[in-house]
Image (tube, coloured by chain):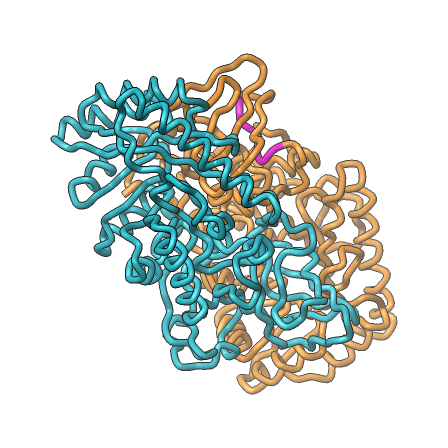
Chain colours: A orange, B cyan
């Protein structure tokens, strides 16, 4: 088994393989923790990026109170490993899911996001029966066009419903401002508008005597502006922990700061300018993540373009004179780390270019 | 565990979930087998599409001699399950991989594709040491621009190398004509040009007394033209076994013939025309597969558009008046079945809309 290879140089690993550099990981974790500390905002990192118990422990060790997750299955994996302050930032529907939510709430502190009366009523029926009260945050759509109530009127009506129902308790508001990803220049404007919209609705609810203690926002690109988002109480960035080509382009560190890379090998050299590597969409994903220019960055060769991905092939256009004979190993920074991580069951943990450990992507492949 | 739910109606399953309809699967398998029989061409389906032992058995039961795979890990899974006539259509590099190849060749009949002297020499050194002779096919690039020797001259030089090396034996030529996917109109032309190019190079090699017995081509779109590809001895389609939105658009059956679907639930209804489902890129993949118009087809609602995918969210634009309250379950035909399958560890096997079994995606998540 590959996973037994510890103490070898990373270049010795069979490919394609996911590498996680510990020093870079810890720098990213500490950097975000420092930003949150200095802004006086609680950090609740989104763990869908890494799905790794070991990374979650490091985030908590650096001062996060708890984690955000996208799925019940992720929440369960973390709870089984003693990480039980969780926010499920996803509308949960159906009795099997509500039952699992209640089981989690019996063991730890679990918040959820809601944007509909239907979901609130379903959860209430089950949680109240078990004598539980589940803290809920209303999700507001601040312009991304995904989930969320649309305005203060809808938020108020949902707040009324929640307040009247047993087994649920309104504690705050949340948003996900995916529009912060649109451009490096737009991040600050989008992040400010998102927070302002959330605070405006919070104010309207508070005027009606709803208790809105928690204002939760955040993504990696908006972290740079965290200090200016007055009124926000919690920040939920995800990708920062690894970083990737998209985040580097949006201003979160440099390509060199990216902790998650794919180790690949040149397996074919059909022409003098074409090198084929053993990493395709089933290794890197087909998440372009807004990068028109290639599917990943080849470390050490900024002029090369990872021009095409098929399922198990990546085609690199060699430019600038460097060569890459068959057998050359290359490190690729993926465009989108969350997607790339999700293709793998194991990640090789590397320190000073030597494999120290293998971590299982425990939260991957869970149905719901 | 979800995987214990057998005998329930498919709509009862927790979502998101992958459904495989047995009747449609078997129809697709039989249809391709009949095309190959009538063309007098051997069928060696590409199993990277399904990675499922149970599907492989059905393909062999319908008359295929063996399978094609993209990775050693896939080959090993099938070999462990008694399916040992395999073609690894991928350039294998490195001693760990050559060692595994030799182990497979000791147990069954394993062919490989090569396009370089380097790979041939590496394999030869290890296979000859063990007294093995591995049949190899030279890969020719017929216009797709991925792997493969570029012309008859290069093919001839590689054929000379192979013939002189111990432990390897030249048995034929292969190509992958990805350009057949470019448009429905272009499939016939691209498929014919691919075969013609391969036969031209085969002829040049035969004139030099190389034995080129096997001419292997194929993809699902080109199957309709299989009868006209004189000289071809083997056909390697993959996606036909499930079919998907892309294949239906290219002419392999209709959307209704697609055997692999994602069962999803409407979890949020933020606006009258927006429905959010619990299937995003981590369920359906971000393989657009050439479809500018949406990320999948919602069965029964041809006017709806699956407009956006994030990791765990799909946003449907409702059009045409139909409604989709929270809790509605929907079946989505993915744009690219191979990618969607690869996101899942299990698939629910359905017959007459009732779950009959759960199959483990045994070939998924293997490093190499």
Q: Is residue B60 left or right of residue A193?
A: left
Residue A167 against residue B73 in the figure, above or below: below
Q: Nearer the viewer, residue A34 or B335?
A: B335
Q: Which residues lie in the magenta part?
A: A294-300
> In the orientation shown, which residue stands out farthest toward the bottom?
A129
Q: Is residue A103 left or right of residue B288?
A: left
> In the orientation shown, which residue stands out farthest toward the top?
A321
Q: Position of residue A20 (x, y in %)?
A: 46, 37
Tell me the residue at 46%/27% (across/down): A330
Q: Nearer the viewer, residue A189 or A62?
A: A189
Residue B43 against residue A256 in the figure, above or below: below
Tell me the residue at 18%/32% (across/down): B133
Q: Position of residue B52 (x, y in %)?
A: 35, 58
Quarter the C terminus of chain B occupies = top left
Q: Position of residue A222 (x, y in %)?
A: 72, 44
Q: Position of residue B159 (x, y in %)?
A: 30, 22
Quarter the N terminus of chain B occupies = bottom left
Whether residue B256 is visible, yes or no, is yes
Tell me the residue at 50%/34% (across/down): A314
Residue B50 against residue B137 in the figure, above or below: below
Q: Is residue B98 left or right of residue B32?
A: left
Instruction: Examine the image and state in which quarter residue A198 appears.
Output: bottom right
Residue B10 against residue A242 in the figure, above or below: below
Q: Nearer the viewer, residue A326 or A234?
A: A326
Q: Nearer the viewer, residue B92 or B243?
A: B243
Q: How many marks?
A: 0
The reply to whether the magenta stretch includes residue B227 is no
Tell me the residue at 42%/19% (across/down): A325
Whether residue A172 is visible, yes or no, is no
């Amino acid at each position: 088994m590959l996973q037994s290879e510890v103490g070898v140089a990373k270049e010795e690993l069979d490919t394609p393989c996911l590498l996680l550099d510990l020093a870079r990981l810890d720098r990213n974790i500490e950097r975000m923790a420092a930003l949150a500390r200095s802004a006086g905002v609680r950090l609740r990192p989104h763990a869908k990026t890494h799905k790794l118990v070991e990374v979650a422990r490091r985030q908590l060790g650096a001062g996060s109170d708890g984690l955000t997750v996208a799925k019940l299955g992720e929440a369960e994996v973390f709870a089984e490993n003693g990480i039980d302050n969780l926010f499920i930032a996803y509308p949960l529907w159906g009795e099997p899911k509500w039952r699992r939510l209640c089981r989690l709430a019996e063991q730890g502190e679990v918040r959820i996001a809601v944007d509909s009366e239907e979901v609130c009523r379903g959860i209430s029926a089950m949680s109240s029966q078990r004598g539980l009260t589940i803290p809920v945050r209303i999700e507001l759509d601040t312009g991304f066009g995904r989930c969320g109530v649309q305005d203060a009127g809808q938020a108020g009506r949902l707040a009324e419903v929640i307040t009247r129902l047993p087994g649920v308790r309104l504690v705050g508001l949340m948003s996900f401002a995916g529009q912060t990803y649109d451009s490096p220049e737009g991040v600050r404007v989008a992040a400010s508008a998102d927070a302002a919209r959330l605070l405006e609705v919070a104010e309207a609810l508070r005027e009606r005597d709803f208790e809105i203690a928690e204002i939760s926002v955040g993504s990696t690109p908006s972290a740079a502006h965290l200090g200016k988002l007055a009124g926000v109480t919690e920040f939920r960035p995800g990708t920062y922990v690894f970083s990737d080509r998209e985040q580097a382009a949006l201003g979160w560190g440099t390509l060199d700061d990216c902790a998650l890379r794919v180790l690949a090998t040149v397996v074919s050299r059909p022409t003098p300018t074409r090198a084929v590597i053993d990493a395709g969409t089933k290794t890197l994903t087909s998440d372009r993540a807004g990068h028109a220019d290639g599917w990943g960055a080849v470390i050490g060769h900024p002029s090369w373009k990872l021009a095409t991905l098929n399922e198990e092939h990546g085609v690199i256009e060699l430019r600038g004179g460097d060569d890459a004979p068959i057998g050359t190993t290359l490190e690729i920074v993926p465009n989108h780390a969350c997607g790339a991580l999700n293709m793998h069951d194991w990640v090789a943990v590397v320190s000073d270019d030597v494999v120290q450990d293998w971590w299982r992507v425990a939260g991957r492949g869970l149905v719901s």
